[in-house]
Amino acid sequence: MIKRRTLLQSLTGAATLGAMGASLPFNNLVRAAGKPVVALLPGVVDPFYFTMKRGADQAAEEEGIELLFQIPKAWNVTDQVPILKAIIAKKPDVLLISPVDKDQLIQPLKEAADAGIKVITVDTYIGEGKYQTGSGKADFPLSYVASDNTEGGRIAARALAKAIGEKGSVYCENNKPGISSTDQRMVGFEEEIAKFPNIKVLKTQYNEDDANKAAAHVAAVLAREPDLAGIFGVNTFSGMGASEGVKKAGKSGVVKIVVFDAVPGIDASLKSGLVDVAIAQKPSEMGYVGVKFASDLIKGKTIPTWQGTGFVVMDKSNIDQEDVHKYIYSN
Amino acid sequence: MTDISIDDQLGRIALLTRLWPWLFLLTLLTFFEIWAQIEVGRSFLFNAYNAQAILLAASAPLLLATGQTFVIITSGIDLSVGFVMGLAAVVVAQVTLLTGNTEIALLVGIAATLLVCAISGWISGTLVARLGVPAFIGTLGMYGVARGAGFLSAGSGMTVSIDNPGLVWLGTGWVPVIVTGLLLLIMHFVLSQTRFGQYTYAIGGNLQSAARAGIDVKRHLIKIYILSACFAGIGGIVYTARYAAGAANAGESMLLDSIAAVVIGGASLFGGTGNVIGTLIGALIIAVIQFGLIFIDVDAFWQFIAVGVVIILSVLIDQYKDKLVRAA
Amino acid sequence: MKPILEARNISIRFGGVEALKNVSLGVSPGEVLALAGDNGAGKSTLIKVISGVYHPHAGELFFDGAPLHLRDPQDARAKGIETIYQDLALADNLDVGSNIFLGREPMHRRFGVNVINRPQMRKVAREVLDRLDIVVPEKKLAGPVRTLSGGQRQAIAIGRAIYWDARVLIMDEPTAALGVPEQRKVMELIHGLKAQGVAVILISHNLHDIFGVADRILVLRRGELAGERLVKETDGDEIVRLMVGDTYAATKTATAT
């Protein structure tokens, strides 16, 4: 059995040699020799997750681990679960996954755990995101590696408060309710912004990840509150729509915009003043730490059940610095 | 004598059911105007900023809804428009970038986008008209294809950023509104004054009779799906112009708004009725509700409820309308 | 009189079934020819051949003495062969004028482009209805035809045919869906067409109608010509006998005696 598998893999390796370069067959041969395998299954095709993969690649090389990488075409359960099943069938030692839904992925991941695969969630979580508590309720993953989104919300609140001189009215332009990451950012933002007595927070608007709707919301909010001082764009498209809405209203630079995430092109937006502050996560750190943890698990070490990976606050003044610029996500 | 007055009364009610979208829009505007005058001491409507914002908000779903009006009149439906719009938003950015990102490149990009959309419309139309696939299923298939193609053409991300002066101009200020308005006028003219429009109604009213009258029904239907996809394409181009980036999910949430605009505007999903001006009113009603409810500071989720209620209302009125017209 | 439309030895098969076997007919201007026969006798198939919907496997058509080749219904219509189908073939959502002109809309130039000439359509709609002596209130004239009665709609279908100078008018069960007064109106219309020199081919189940308006009756049975009689030389019993066949008629006679 083992022999046949080795043979087959060498053959596939040889077949792909011409097209894919020399590293793949080499990896396959080494793997057959007993290199540990870690699978990385992020949420959706997105620069954020490709940046995560690069961090993971680096750690994998350092630790001598073979990294399997598969990525769903769209952010939903029906796209992610079939890929997960295929990965379970391959039996990697550790699975790093960004579950696209905190409830619906519990059962499929339980299957992986039951098959003896160690599960670590990165960026997003299942259940409450609190693992190994002994509650038996979706606490079987061994660690959660991500940005502390609540903390990210707090950082955004402080940045926005500073940008508007700690007074005036602000509001949050959000994707849609029910997504763990954006909901937590909102919680942190609201907690922190409440500490500024001269800042008034208006009702949150939900745009279903549509920049057009976000822009229309900004227009309507400005109609009611012509003195609007700032907007927190809770994710990429919210931020895109918010800056377009502000631009159309002729209020660029007057209404301050803080957006979450450092999508490609954010440097240009910061420099032109379309966006005042961007809160960048460190997806490459997530991938790096995730694979390091995986390696520790394989070696039999214990790992923390939660690891935050921090943020970088970007603005016009620091975006050209190399140690800030490198945190912009890229494909 | 009494008979005549009853007849007149019914006639008046029938007229009311036809004009209700206008009246409803007027009522909405009056309500928000009064509220604005009392609460904030400003005009809601006679305010260039508000007017531009509402028209701009209406223009995106309206581009999809204009083509959709033709489709729905033939008793079809085009579910693919949302993702065709996304595909177009990505394709216009990619092709313009690939051909050098000049003014000429932009024209190439726009032409290529419309071609891609025309092909997807042709596929939908062929499925529906020649292969007998129900419109709901055929265009749902195209929905999936356009969705996948959009994400694939965007490469590994969901968006493609582009900085092109011509494209920027297309997204500036009133330009998207004017482009939408002009296209709307042209399509209103086509639907109400040309054979193309007349045949669209005839097919929706009685497909067989249209065929017997010598209309090439299948060809006409294919043309209509191409039209619908091209309008979605223009929507995508305008999106990319406004955001300096094409996103594969650009039109996802616009699909339902566009169908709602057509239905509120008086079209029946059973076909045969509807017109472009009605669709304009429908889209304006949705935009005014969404803008107005934020303006009077109502919680976001009420917007969904309000638009939902208006859709239900318009369908009920549509069903009731026929009975009244028959009675009158 | 010389027939305006003639069909000679028409045969047509669908799969293995021979729907028409060697059937011939002719109709002259100002004549009403009734097609009678049981369900499935081939009446509808025959008129679809004449109106260009089906292509016969054998046999020929002649129009005004010249051979006639019909590729599609438009061809037939171009020759002046109009068909009024059982379901009227009106677009219910369009007004009277639009239905009369469906597929042949008059155009005029406005703002430098060709647009549909709606005033003319409305004018013709009024004229056509007047000519047929049909009263439709002005506001309904501009509304969708679904608000009109069955008789009025039948009149529109007939009016459309005569407006387009039908020389041969084929009518498939024109009274089937109508009430008695409206049936009478349609019969009057057919008399009027006859007086104007139109050749009419009428399909009907209703012997009363046939005897009321037709000059000649052609009876089909199982795709074959069962007999041809002048109305003034026959009666209902004979036609029924031709329709159902001798065997059945014989048994019936046998049981009766």
Image (spheres, coloured by chain):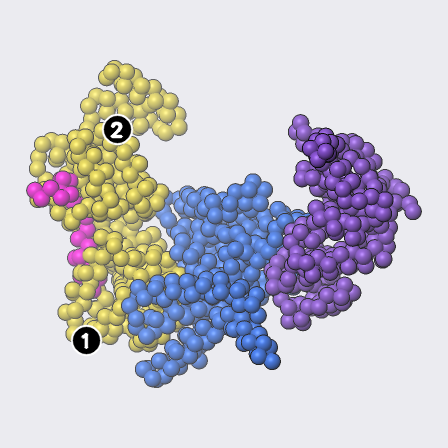
Chain colours: A yellow, B blue, C purple
Q: Is residue A62 visible?
A: no
Res A173 → quadrant: bottom left
The image quadrant where one finds the N terminus of chain A is top left
The amino acid beneath tag 1 is Asn
Range shown magenta: A134-157
Position above or below: B68 against A216: above
Image x and y of residue A253, in percent? 32, 70
Seen at 49% across and 62% down, the residue is: B319
Q: Is residue B131 magenta?
A: no
Is the C terminus of chain A in the top left, top right, bottom left or bottom right quadrant?
A: top left
Closest to the observer: A264 or A92?
Answer: A92
Q: Is residue A156 magenta?
A: yes
Q: Is residue B180 above or below residue B109?
A: below
Circle 2 is placed at which residue position? A90
The image shows residue C65 at horizontal and vertical percentages of 89, 42
In the rendered image, which residue does mark 1 sit on?
Answer: A198
Seen at 23% across and 66% down, the residue is: A160
**Residue at point 43% right, 60% down?**
B257
Q: Position of residue C232 (x, y in %)?
A: 85, 47
Marks 2 and 1 share the same chain: yes
Which badge, 2 or 1, comes first in the chain's sequence?
2
